[in-house]
Image (cartoon, coloured by chain):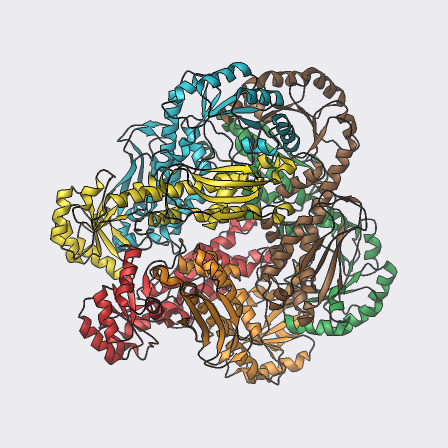
Chain colours: A cyan, B yellow, C brown, D green, E red, F orange
Amino acid sequence: MRETIRRALREDLGPAWRDLSTEALGPARERPAIGEVLVKADGVLCGIGVIGPVIELVEAASVSTFRQAFPTTIEPLAVDGDRVGAGTVVARLRGPVCTLLTAERTLLNLMQRLSGIATLTRRFVDAVAGTRARILDTRKTTPGLRSLEKTAVRTGGGVNHRFGLYDMVMLKDNHLTAMGGDIALAVAEARRRSGPAVRIEVETATLEQVRAAVAAGADLIMLDNMPPALMRQCVAEVAGRVPLEASGGITLETVRAVAETGVDYISVGALTHSAPALDISMKIRLA
Amino acid sequence: MRETIRRALREDLGPAWRDLSTEALGPARERPAIGEVLVKADGVLCGIGVIGPVIELVEAASVSTFRQAFPTTIEPLAVDGDRVGAGTVVARLRGPVCTLLTAERTLLNLMQRLSGIATLTRRFVDAVAGTRARILDTRKTTPGLRSLEKTAVRTGGGVNHRFGLYDMVMLKDNHLTAMGGDIALAVAEARRRSGPAVRIEVETATLEQVRAAVAAGADLIMLDNMPPALMRQCVAEVAGRVPLEASGGITLETVRAVAETGVDYISVGALTHSAPALDISMKIRLA
Amino acid sequence: MRETIRRALREDLGPAWRDLSTEALGPARERPAIGEVLVKADGVLCGIGVIGPVIELVEAASVSTFRQAFPTTIEPLAVDGDRVGAGTVVARLRGPVCTLLTAERTLLNLMQRLSGIATLTRRFVDAVAGTRARILDTRKTTPGLRSLEKTAVRTGGGVNHRFGLYDMVMLKDNHLTAMGGDIALAVAEARRRSGPAVRIEVETATLEQVRAAVAAGADLIMLDNMPPALMRQCVAEVAGRVPLEASGGITLETVRAVAETGVDYISVGALTHSAPALDISMKIRLA
Amino acid sequence: MRETIRRALREDLGPAWRDLSTEALGPARERPAIGEVLVKADGVLCGIGVIGPVIELVEAASVSTFRQAFPTTIEPLAVDGDRVGAGTVVARLRGPVCTLLTAERTLLNLMQRLSGIATLTRRFVDAVAGTRARILDTRKTTPGLRSLEKTAVRTGGGVNHRFGLYDMVMLKDNHLTAMGGDIALAVAEARRRSGPAVRIEVETATLEQVRAAVAAGADLIMLDNMPPALMRQCVAEVAGRVPLEASGGITLETVRAVAETGVDYISVGALTHSAPALDISMKIRLA
Amino acid sequence: MRETIRRALREDLGPAWRDLSTEALGPARERPAIGEVLVKADGVLCGIGVIGPVIELVEAASVSTFRQAFPTTIEPLAVDGDRVGAGTVVARLRGPVCTLLTAERTLLNLMQRLSGIATLTRRFVDAVAGTRARILDTRKTTPGLRSLEKTAVRTGGGVNHRFGLYDMVMLKDNHLTAMGGDIALAVAEARRRSGPAVRIEVETATLEQVRAAVAAGADLIMLDNMPPALMRQCVAEVAGRVPLEASGGITLETVRAVAETGVDYISVGALTHSAPALDISMKIRLA
Amino acid sequence: MRETIRRALREDLGPAWRDLSTEALGPARERPAIGEVLVKADGVLCGIGVIGPVIELVEAASVSTFRQAFPTTIEPLAVDGDRVGAGTVVARLRGPVCTLLTAERTLLNLMQRLSGIATLTRRFVDAVAGTRARILDTRKTTPGLRSLEKTAVRTGGGVNHRFGLYDMVMLKDNHLTAMGGDIALAVAEARRRSGPAVRIEVETATLEQVRAAVAAGADLIMLDNMPPALMRQCVAEVAGRVPLEASGGITLETVRAVAETGVDYISVGALTHSAPALDISMKIRLA
């Protein structure tokens, strides 16, 4: 996370690590101030932990002996995973106005995005409450932020699917085609090469493929873009021998129906590629 | 860009830089294939240039002499800025199926996001056609992707606002408060400290502040969250002496009315923090 | 791999990236030479692929226009996984004597270590030939070389266990103790938190624990430091429902007996922490 | 050292810096525990200093406020260079069980390797006790660990030879051949180009070459693979004018005889490329 | 700055981060000492802030428990921008003699260079006292030190010109030629592409060009290598509508005459590419 | 060198790696042009090799397919070490005008500095022609450029002293004081700890100290700030047994007299900390 924050600050402060606007204030930039991180819409909070490193990195770059004499303190008023309503102050910062102003945008850009993901995840999780289905994320994450975004999904009550191409085998249609369409062969080869630490998932589109995947010993079966009726058939056919994952364009409107087919997991790309940011701002006033 | 792509691939391929799923194919992973990058919704293309580096970095990590013997070729069929309709193939790749499969998600994650931004920008630009107003981005960008996202805004016909805290002075309400609310003093101090390379913008909320900013010699004046009628007054008052930027919650619905007040620039945070991804996929088939 | 090689060269060439000994030769350092990479003991070759990047990085640092005019060529005479006898030349290099001399030690340090691991792995694999047992590595790898060393294990015919703490759950005695010794609870909690991409292994020391792990739904069970007779009982008890991994101080002398108990996997830390280097040298002569 | 440790942790914790097994414990992962670093074989300790940075880096990655509230403390019970017997506890750690479990393998992998090198070095040093010979290391080190391994050699009582190609001139047979076999010319050229900060060593195989090297003003002369009788002749011939280094396949069995020829230094590649790890483990128990 | 200092220390301490000379002292290297940073010529101090990070990085690399027990303290006796006379002690350090000796050269190399720049800048600033002209730096800075050197210019009373190619448009003769010599077109195109955050400067050599640049709406006009008489004409012609920058081979001898022409800015490449180092040393004595 | 150039370009092009001025030209930026690197004062050329990597890195950042279609070619017309007169064109570049304009300053900043050092070194070397004295550099180099600057010293005919604290022992007055002022003890301890790869130099101020250093077996003796008459005495006393280095404020005016005392080396800090840049520019014209 620290590296991600450092990169974000470098984007904002440039190669000479400068904030021209606060420099322009001259000595007035060191006046004591209070900043309140204010959530402006209902949602699930995620990212409260970025405030500390952002402030720390902004301070570290400072050569002002003043800033060392008057460090910024952070008072967290909520924790990740809290459901927060519009108007909630989730943290209060006290420090020189320049530190708060320089840190503001970087801090908010991250918190807004992560809270947006946690909030959307929570809505999906709530929508399937009472079924056995759990909500999964995908690899459709923002380049450079995958790890933080997957944490946000967990914060919202979801479960992480694989983190990348390196921690699981997923045999999609193209992989199967390359193996002559032979699911049994594909799974056997995958098992032989991958060793006991690696799960193998098979993507299926028909009941026959599901049967083949079960027979081949798949650890997980993805039902790709199937209508709910067909999913239900698959659930009945598999009868709990292998967990099933529904996938493909599932929305808040359709997720309940999918969950009620009895699948174990529902993966939703939109959690990370389309979650609207949660509106969060920082109110700064001189102390 | 190269560094961003390398980071995205590292997220997907992990510390050992492996794709377990294509490895699981054994020798079949080297079968020749064709991949078509297919846009599935109307929009403005951005990011065609990421395909090359993604493929190159995926290939560089390969130790297979086969891949060197059978390199992947890229045939671009569109350029950044093209308006593309659903169903357009914007690039065709030929190479071993493993290279295409490993590169697919990283390549699409970036293209979808950048094209989404270019598409939304274009919609705003079209909405103000015929007025003098130009569409600006903000600093509300994705951490780590600011430079690419600002390029996407230009690709969609927008204009870049400052890149960060380091290349312009923006005196917001908090900066002015720290200077005792004295716009003239604040601008003079900023000018004295910043030198001739740096523009100074002043945020205003009232006609009086606009007058003060003009008198102080601001290079640019932001009209923050003003109703259109007030903006119109400001435009009349300033009479072209200083460019004016409208800002604050402006949407596709409201942007035309804002533009017709006569302001020079309209900044829209949503361009980068809320643009929905453009739906793009890769269709792979064995050659 | 490239980054590992660059680091190794930086250690050898220092901050100014210099080889004082070849510089001391003056113009004579550019005389054409032939270098033969010679294996001096029987073993399994691994690391032939490091020669290319080492040479490339050494050349890249050179400013001599001569070296560009007279690039080093590499003729591989064997591939990774080949069983090679003492006296085998596995690659022939042609280039200026300075390039060969500067690259020599870095290239050999890596090849010797990787071939040593592949060779030892092969000996273990051969020792269990005809049984169902497969040889696994561990996390007892050289800091900084894990990925390369795990490749060497595969090259020698072994299978990789998990790559790190990040791609699998392994519940050891301390983890179980922290959960009050309750295997069922520990596995259930692990499953709930980890999602469908992650396998869960349980370490056991008694038949009772093995039964509990099977009942809890473990994906893999480690038999830790059990005598072969007890392992045999466990194999009978589990009857193929969950794969079993034997672990704990297993040597070339004892591995056959362990394999004959019927376990699925045998993990051997010595593959990576104690494999003696395979003796490989480079014979250089002026062309 | 810090960078090496960070790299080792990154290998073990992956791109998202996670330990799935301790995460699987849920709140139980924060139970207080005691970890004892226990040496299980007689040897010379080296690497006690890695414990601190490993713990610090593991804690730095933690976002848990708990871990900050309950930091891990380290009580060192031995220092580098101590001769330790099997059963010695060399450090005691107190902290949350998750910190100890996550840090365990990285910490041990480094300490085992370094202590192994120090132990083997000490055996060579003891073997030549009473002679004038001192034990030297070589450049046959583990890629990425050279500096730490050379420290381990000093810890074991050895002396460091050059650190790389950048801090000394070593004229081997190939260098001499490139200069037409003329030792006087080679040394003169090396002296002229290298300046007064650089020592020049010449590799020799015959008494004639030793005489030529002395005459040429070499700072150090390597006796390469000479039988002891010939070494003795060289020692007599040189009569202390230039220090002599014996080199080439010297083992614990042969080193005493070599030392008794009167050479000043004996270099041993095995110190770093073949030292067996010293068996060290961590015993963790809940507090 | 921290990164620059780390790089400088890495150059001096090498890949194994060692100071052989203080190591050679054995235990005596830990004797307490006092180091005084002594300015040996009249000048303007700049760089007092590098002492802290240099000491901190030197200490961080130390594994000696002694150094932790006896940390180095820094007592600053002057601040950046102070005019200091020969013989002034600007800081006093107390710590083990090895820390002071290892840090000495890196610390002085930076302070001497930065103070040299501040001193020369101050001489130029003093030379134009009483005129409206302000002294600007250029991009002719030392590779790797631009940001620090530009800070030194501000410390000496100067003003920073652009930081690089990325924060301002400067249309020089070659740019204008590429646009067919049409200043109006060049400025209009630049304005259209660059947006409101970017200033545009035009380089001119004749009165006609100055007129054209004013008409085109340039934000700043450079008078390149003009004789003072012509500058005076330009000042009269422009009459304060656009700030003017004099440039081209201006020295301490000629700068007053240039300033008296009435230009707003005078840029001086020599500030950064030719400032002689201010002579500063460290006097160390045992405490 | 590549890393230094990349850093310099990053300073100039900023985090988004942009040249706003050439971007402002629009399509005209791709017009073919010729750039001539022109030396404008007599001197010794150094740095011709930076042109290639600068151009390559500038091109690599370009996404323009045009630039790939029209690569920049470099025609070197001189080599490092050439004595060049004012007016000499040392390289001719052909490429799109934007590539030349973007590369210009970075390329010149490096070449001017390195050629300045080579030129000054050559003047010192010429000044001592006919004596046995050779000209040495020091560690008073520009932070971040030490390796390149030491190459420039060799290019000018000088010899490199140690590269840093890591490749030689230098016992200065403070080191000797820490050892109780006992030169014999200090050298013996240094020898024992440092091994045979490391030279030991002793700084002396009196004839007695020189005698002690010879007796102690120093490899090199520095005569610090001695008057020529005393140096002459030291030369006579030492009689060639140990090389002698004169040091301390030696200028072009005094160097001949120092050389004629018979010392072996003269070290000059000014070579790197005070060499005036050689005036070099790039003349660009459209092709």
Q: Does C18 appear above or below D154?
A: below
**Quadrant that contains the C terminus of chain A:** top left
Q: Does A202 appear above or below E117?
A: above
**Quadrant that contains the N terminus of chain A:** top left
- Out of F198 and C66, give the one closest to the viewer: C66
Residue F156 locus on image (x, y percent): 55, 76
- Residue B79 visible in rendering: yes
Q: Specify whether B270 is left or right of E50.
A: left
Residue D102 locus on image (x, y percent): 55, 34
Q: What's the residue at 63%, 37% (across, down)?
A: B28
Residue E35 locus on image (x, y percent): 47, 62
Q: Specify whether F262 is left or right of A42.
A: right
- Out of E10 and C287, give the one closest to the viewer: C287
Q: Specify whether A191 is left or right of B173.
A: right
Q: Quadrant of residue D74?
A: top right
Q: Quadrant of residue D34?
A: top right
- Out of A235 and C91, give the one closest to the viewer: A235
Q: Quadrant of residue C215?
A: top right
Q: What's the residue at 82%, 56% (across, down)?
A: D258
- Residue D278 visible in rendering: no
Residue D33 locus on image (x, y percent): 55, 29
Q: Specify whether D33 is left or right of C80.
A: left
Number of marks drawn: 0
Q: Does F124 appear above or below E98?
A: below
Q: Does A254 appear above or below C143?
A: above
The residue lying furthest to the right in this view is D229
- Out of F70 and B165, give the one closest to the viewer: F70
